[in-house]
Image (cartoon, rainbow, N blue to C red):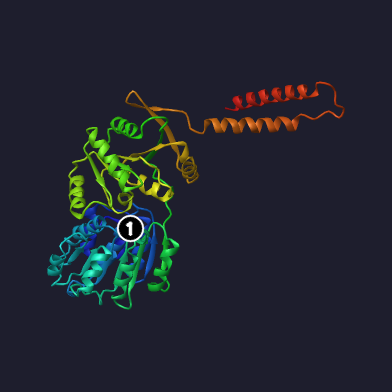
Amino acid sequence: MINHQFKKFGFQPFLNKAIEELGFYQPTEIQEKMIPLILKGESAVGQSQTGTGKTHSYLLPILEKIYPEKQEVQAVITAPTRELASQIHQEIVSITKFSEKTITARCLIGGTDKQKDMEKLKKQPHLVVGTPGRIRDLIKEQALSVYKAQILVVDEADLMLDMGFIVEVDQIASRMDKDLQMLVFSATIPEKLKPFIKKYMENPEYVQVQPKKASAETIEHILVPLKSREKIDLLYQLLIAFNPYLALVFTNTKQMADEVADALAAKGLKTGRIHGDLTPRERKKMMKQIRDLEFQYIVATDLAARGIDIEGVSHVINYELPQDLDFYIHRSGRTGRAGFSGICASIYTPSDEDILNRLEKRGIRFLHRDIQKDAIIEIPDRNRRKNREKMADETELKAKALVRKPKKVKPGYKKKIRQEIEKLKRREKRLKAKKK
């Protein structure tokens, strides 16, 4: 019994069964727009923020188009990080287990035994998902044959560009079917990405899904001033006061992530860490520990905001605010998911005012809090003085406009004008107070 709104896409029974088991009922906006295009075989660029359901917007229609009887690679999915590639592979496995006919998928990522990968590829899979470098290497070794594959997915394309992987993706695409259906998914479309898109996509459909708000309503954004305190001590106090189910602490660099993780561990908190300098073995072990809920606190760089999906994050703490507004949105989007509430707290200094003002212009509404005797307390808005001064300036200008300079100047006229201005300013204040 199909009781979801995906049935309009005409998927095979096993996909409808998988959708039911996944608990999906209504397609997200990106799914609503991308699925029909992919089913029709059109190349497309999907631009949407993290957490909008884009992974299933391409997995479901791609699996619909796979021919299980053809034992050849029919689709290649590239991802910028090993963790994201592994997660996509797990999603494929969780869907294809409902199929009566066997659909095979291989996860090919760096940091694993290449020889073992080559052994497994003696029988070509239907789908390949992995990092660009490893996929390209296996194609060069002639262990992986993609020349008949007609679908290429480039997931998190802007991050792929930042990490320098677009060259490898280009090399993979050039070995694939000439009538390639390319699907590019990205939170942003940087100028440097456009030549790559133009090379392989003649007239792609552009699907842009703007979030209705910069941040989900389930997320509470909190600002905590550093003042003259030690930053690591303030972070520790906040984490203890919040007592999160799982907290992600963000830093801007790998070095700072290590420093913060070490400092928290020295204070007795069992702390995990995720950043690009971990060895493949360390990253794999860390992700398993995170999934097994061995840590209550994880210190991470922006890799975790984009390339890894960590479930159950109740709190996001910005130890350092990012200069790129999109990164703030991605970070905060790690919490408050699937209808649950979440908190995104940021430690700030006066030098962060510019980014805070820009975030407020985007619609982020900050609550102002501090910590006192191990408890989170409410404090006045950081802009209160600025607002007061602005109000005083406006009142004075209005008062000066109302007071006329006498035609004949008499002794003491300046004093009288000042008195009149003060009188008008007091009247303005009373009127405003009555209105309130």
* Tally of marks: 1
Residue sitting at x 74%, y 23%: 420
Residue sitting at x 24%, y 32%: 267
Quadrant in which the N terminus is drawn:
bottom left
Q: Secondary structure at mark 1?
A: helix
Residue of label 1: 54
Q: Residue furthest right?
A: 408
Q: Which one is nearer the viewer's eye here, 159 or 312?
A: 159
Query: Quarter of the image holding residue 166?
Result: bottom left
Query: Quarter of the image holding residue 290?
Result: top left
184 vs 241: above or below: below
Quadrant in which the C terminus is drawn:
top right
Position in image of residue 175 (x %, y %): 28, 76
Position in image of residue 312 (x %, y %): 26, 43
Q: Which one is nearer the viewer's eye here, 205 or 80?
A: 80
Position in image of residue 201 (x %, y %): 39, 72
Mark 1 neighbour class, 10 Å CA radius: few under 14, some 14 to 19, many 20 or more: many
261 vs 75: above or below: above
Position in image of residue 372 (x %, y %): 36, 24
Q: Which one is nearer the viewer's eye here, 354 or 223?
A: 354
Q: Residue furthest bottom?
A: 178
Query: Quarter of the image holding residue 257?
Result: top left
Q: Tell me if residue 247 can be seen.
A: no
Q: Tell me if residue 418 can be seen.
A: yes
